[in-house]
Amino acid sequence: MNPCVAIKDGGLFTPLKLQNITLKNRVLRSATYEGLGDPSGCPRTELANVYRNLAQGGVGAIITGFVYTSQAGRAMHPSQCGIDDDKKTEEWKTIIEQVKNDFPDIRFFMQLAHTGRQTRSEVTGQPAVGVSSKKCTYFRQPVTVLSCNEIETIIREFGQAARRAKAAGFDGVQLHAAHGYLIHQFLSPWTNTRRDRWGHPHLFLEETIRAVKSSCGQNFPLLLKLSAADDNTPGIRLSDTIETIQRMESFHIDAVEISYGTMEYALNIIRGTCPVDLVLHANPLFNKTPRIFRNLWKIFREKSYTSRFIPFDKNYNMEAAAQIKKATSLPVIVVGGIRDKESMITALTTYGLDAISLCRPLICDPDWPQKIKAGLSLGSACTNCNVCTIQCDSPQPLQCHQNMKKELR
Ligand SMILES: Cc1cc2nc3c(=O)[nH]c(=O)nc-3n(C[C@H](O)[C@H](O)[C@H](O)COP(=O)(O)O)c2cc1C
């Protein structure tokens, strides 16, 4: 039996020692795009308030929203932050220092990401690049195949980005290897059809880890976020992810965080449905299209589009994370649909997972972990309306739509 069983709240609020770092508890803020980068990708000062609220609200660690490592790897989200040049290090440092001054026991991880084909060239100012020329059906961009030299440059850029994150005061970095971004594109047979040495699904991830370790030192904490599986055929299945994680055991990874899916079926990362009219209004993939075509899309395509959504189900990655935990010696964190205290405790005690992470519940209420600890709340107020997700495509900072509605009342 897991020794946490006898401990209060299943050990949720006991320290978690990962390989090279200790977190004060086992409730993490999963990476969440905050929409607080200026047009050049520098983090705006308001980001410190977001992190201060999260730290005050009781999470043990904050993983930033995805931060781009080079201009070509920017996402479509207009206010994404970057760490692609040394000037940005200072901006990040100011933010991290401010929050750590007030909350010395909070731990920060910067999530490093390259979008590969999952972006728009209008945003990057460059052609979308990818492992192969296969287009993403969501972004519909022609994809320029990366040469071996370009792949090596991107790996070096990950290393430089991690070095900057360390210099800015981050306690570690997380490589975004999930959700169909570039590392996932290398891992997946859906996109990785290369015949050169980069056709090996794990090589890019391994070389990226080596680059981070070589620029930050072997002991600098490193997390991985992986999709347990995705919806493409051929795509990634749980057995592939288990194999990937087992291969990573020799690389001194501090923990793996288990998520799901790719942007090809974007809603399936977060589950549930969304207001389609808002997508047509806010998403630049649709809102630049003349109204008549949008109306035709609604008549002829909406049904087939929404029929691919997987309904929201609580704890939807927990079974997969539990399978992974059984197969690896690495600490495992689970994210996805965790909406009540009981599920958090189950994750730790029944499934033996090491920690849980939260995204939407903390957009809705950053104080939720503190309320759970104090016995003031059992369940999240998040309704999974997913408006926060759709609004990521607008230049506005991230907000909870439910809270906005309450404020307007
Ligand atoms: C508004 C929003 C922004 C997100 N931004 C990121 C991100 O920057 N990086 C990332 O890996 N996942 C991101 N995600 C996915 C979440 O980290 C998480 O995997 C997913 O929302 C499921 O967790 P939840 O049920 O607690 O929301 C985002 C999700 C939402 C809703």
Image (cartoon, rainbow, N blue to C red):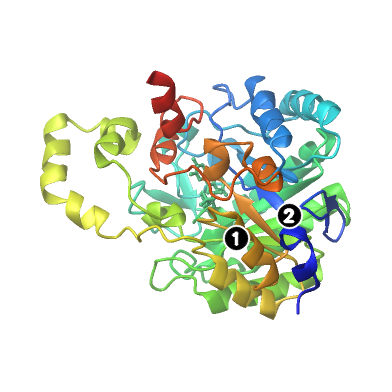
Q: Amino acid at mark 2?
A: Arg
Is 150 drawn above or below residue 408 in the view shown?
Answer: below
Q: Is label 1 or label 2 in front?
A: 1
Q: Amino acid at mark 1?
A: Glu
Q: Which callout, 1 or 2, points at the residue further toward the start of the chain?
A: 2
Is 404 drawn above or below residue 319 in the view shown?
Answer: above
Residue that carries the numbered disc 1 in the rendered image: 342
Secondary structure at numbered mark 1: helix
Classed neighbour count for the residue bearing mark 2: other residues with Cα under 10 Å, few (<14), some (14–19), many (≥20): many
Where residue 252 sits: x, y (%)? 82, 64
* Mark 2 within 8 Å of ligand 1, using the beta carbon: no
Where residue 407 sits: x, y (%)? 44, 21
Residue that appears at 82% across and 31% down:
100
Where residue 298 sits: x, y (%)? 15, 43
Marking on residue 26? 2
Q: Is residue 213 left or right of residue 82?
A: right
Task: State which quarter of the image contains the C terminus.
Answer: top left
Where residue 60 sits: x, y (%)? 75, 46
Secondary structure at numbered mark 2: loop
Q: Nearer the viewer, residue 360 or 296?
A: 360
Query: Which quadrant of the view contains residue 318?
Result: bottom right
Inspect this view and state whether residue 10 appears.
Answer: yes
Is 276 drawn above or below residue 406 in the view shown?
Answer: below
Q: Is residue 340 left or right of residue 43?
A: left
Q: Would you say the residues marked 1 and 2 are in contact, meaning their CB atoms lie under 8 Å apart? A: no
